[in-house]
């Protein structure tokens, strides 16, 4: 029995999340047949994940009834048949709600299937001389032996309807001895590594991900070690790196010492992360800044060309360009970040509490970005599988000047808004060593909102934040 000829390339979903069955076009005549077993452009367009195969394996089976599996491995596979036919069976052995879900299908040269990491795979040959071929996207390593999961072919819960009874099939002793589903430890999710976990965003991510055992937090200094960690850390166990580390001392970056540190952290460090993410097919989440623009436009869209005014902005723009080279990347461009730690709002609330009447810049306009929204936006993009790329993120609402925001803080602290005096940037920094600053920092949120994420209004976030600062500490 030969393959079905001239089927159009098509993808079919299965009951197991991420497992996709494909119809492959096979072209034949009296001489035999030909097919494109792997064609990246066509197949990714049809729905195959761009999973980056690095190895092609073939299993030749002498006789019908040869049965292999059920094996779940720490990499993705794209499986097809070169000659003959197989009955394939797949069982989800990943940690999660679909654990134990099963799916079966017959494969011949006109059919293929994508099997993600952690889904158990098995097959039984239906013809003599069957060649079973598969692409994988990682090389075997002793570091990942503990990430293999096995299930007995005769498991009663999966209840695979083998065409040839297992009592009559050709099995290995190892496959006969694999455990039942009740005894299987599911393959855990890949890990997420958060770099810069001691900063304002890092602390927000700690709060949001505190109950997730698959998340690791690294303090900022670890950024310098990533070059050494590349060979030592088992990156096959990771899926995502969130880079919450940055050098943000805008004025100090204009000094010789500060310039060197800014480039080391914001550019060289990002390069190390990008190298790791690219080599191991990880998703890199990187946080950018409104300082990559000169502030000459009223509203900044994601595709606006870089035009930084100072060293800090130059390093952030360079870091963005590097991060964008990673195939799987999210760059979140922010403005005026407020979270747990030293920041403008905390400073203004402190001045209000001491009865000080400050002079605050009134010709720089933008929106605050509260780290709770920034952290939630990152997790939203990752969870929904939004298209990779750059997204603007700030709190929502009408743009304001720094002086407007300071007046709001004073009012929320029970002080008179008129205690805040607005001055121009030129007046404020007269006689001071300061970096140039963009006057217009308002970010267009249209692209982010199109993914289903709508940030909270800045006014509401500011009210809650100031109230938390004024609340008495306990413990």
Image (cartoon, rainbow, N blue to C red):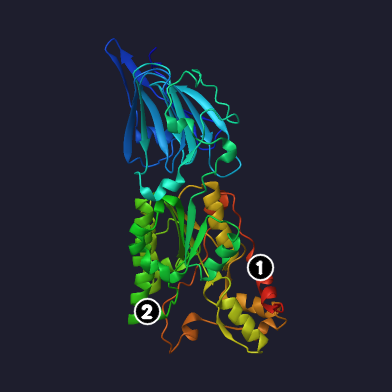
> Does the rendering let one see residue 248?
yes
Mark 1 to mark 2 CA distance (whole Å): 34 Å
Q: Residue furthest left?
A: 31
| Image spot of residue 413 (x, y percent) | 70, 80
Helix, strand or loop status at disc 1: helix
Q: Is residue 32 above or below residue 195?
A: above
Say left or right for 417 vs 273: right
Please state, as top left, top right, bottom left or bottom right, where the N terminus lies in the image.
top left
Q: Decide which of 1, 320 is in the foreground and name it.
A: 1
Residue at mark 2: 258
Q: Decide which of 345, 399 is in the foreground and name it.
A: 345
| Image spot of residue 471 (x, y percent) | 71, 77
Q: Is residue 422 above or below residue 35?
A: below
Count residues near mark 2 (Cα–Cα under 10 Å), then give few for <14, some for 14-19, many for 20+: some
Q: Decide which of 390, 3 is in the foreground and name it.
A: 3
Helix, strand or loop status at disc 2: helix
Could you say which disc has been placed on residue 117 in the image?
none
Residue at mark 1: 459
> Does the rendering let one see residue 47?
no
Which quarter of the figure has residue 464? bottom right
Between marks 1 and 2 in the image, the one whose residue lies nearer the viewer? 2
Say left or right for 320 vs 380: left
The residue sitting at 36% across, 75% down in the picture is: 261
| Image spot of residue 42 (x, y percent) | 38, 32
Count residues near mark 1 (Cα–Cα under 10 Å), then give few for <14, some for 14-19, many for 20+: some
Q: Is residue 473 above or below residue 202?
A: below
Q: Is residue 404 above or below residue 380?
A: below
| N-terminal-most mark, 1 or 2 | 2
Which quarter of the figure has residue 348? bottom right
Count of numbered tags: 2
| Image spot of residue 93 (x, y percent) | 53, 39
Please state, as top left, top right, bottom left or bottom right, where the C terminus lies in the image.
bottom right
């Amino acid at each position: 029995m030969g393959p079905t000829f001239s089927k159009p390339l098509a993808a079919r979903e299965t009951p197991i999340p991420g497992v996709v069955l494909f119809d492959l076009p096979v072209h034949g005549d009296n001489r035999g047949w030909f097919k494109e077993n792997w064609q990246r452009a066509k197949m990714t367009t049809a729905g195959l994940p761009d999973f980056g195969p690095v190895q092609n394996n073939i299993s030749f089976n002498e006789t019908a009834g040869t049965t292999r599996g059920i094996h779940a491995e720490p990499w993705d596979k794209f499986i097809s048949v070169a000659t003959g036919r197989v009955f394939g069976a797949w069982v989800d052995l990943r940690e999660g709600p679909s654990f134990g879900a099963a799916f079966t299908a017959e494969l011949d040269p006109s059919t293929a299937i994508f099997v993600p990491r952690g889904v158990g795979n098995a097959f039984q040959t239906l013809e003599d001389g069957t060649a079973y071929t598969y692409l994988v996207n990682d090389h075997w390593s002793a570091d990942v032996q503990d990430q293999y999961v096995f299930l007995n072919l005769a498991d009663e819960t999966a209840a695979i309807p083998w065409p040839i009874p297992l009592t009559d099939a050709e099995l290995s002793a190892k496959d006969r001895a694999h455990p039942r589903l009740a005894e299987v430890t599911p393959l855990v999710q890949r890990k997420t590594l958060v770099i810069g976990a001691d900063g304002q965003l890092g602390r927000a991510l700690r709060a949001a991900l505190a109950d997730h055992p698959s998340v690791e937090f690294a303090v900022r200094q670890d950024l310098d070690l990533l070059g050494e960690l590349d060979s030592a850390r088992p990156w096959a166990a990771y899926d995502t790196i969130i880079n919450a580390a940055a050098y943000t001392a805008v004025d100090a970056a204009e000094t010789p010492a500060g310039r060197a540190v800014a480039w080391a952290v914001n550019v060289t460090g990002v390069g190390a992360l990008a190298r790791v993410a690219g080599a191991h097919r990880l998703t890199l989440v990187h946080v950018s800044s409104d300082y990559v623009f000169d502030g000459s436009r009223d509203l900044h869209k994601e595709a606006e060309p870089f035009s930084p005014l100072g060293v800090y902005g130059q390093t952030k723009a360079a870091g963005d360009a590097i991060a964008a080279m990673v195939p799987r990347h999210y760059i979140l461009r922010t403005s005026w970040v407020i979270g747990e730690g030293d920041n403008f709002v905390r400073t203004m609330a402190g001045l209000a509490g001491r009865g000080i009447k400050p002079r605050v810049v009134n010709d720089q306009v933008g929106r605050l970005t509260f780290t709770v929204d920034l952290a939630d936006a990152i997790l939203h993009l990752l969870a929904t599988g939004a298209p990779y790329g750059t997204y603007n993120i700030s709190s929502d609402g009408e743009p304001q000047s720094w002086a407007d925001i300071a007046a709001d803080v004073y009012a929320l602290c029970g002080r008179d808004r008129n205690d805040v005096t607005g001055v121009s940037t030129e007046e404020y920094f007269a006689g001071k060593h300061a970096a140039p600053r963009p006057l217009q920092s308002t970010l267009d949120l249209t692209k982010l909102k199109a993914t289903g994420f709508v940030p909270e209004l800045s006014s509401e976030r500011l009210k809650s934040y100031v109230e938390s600062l004024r609340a008495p500490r306990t413990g």
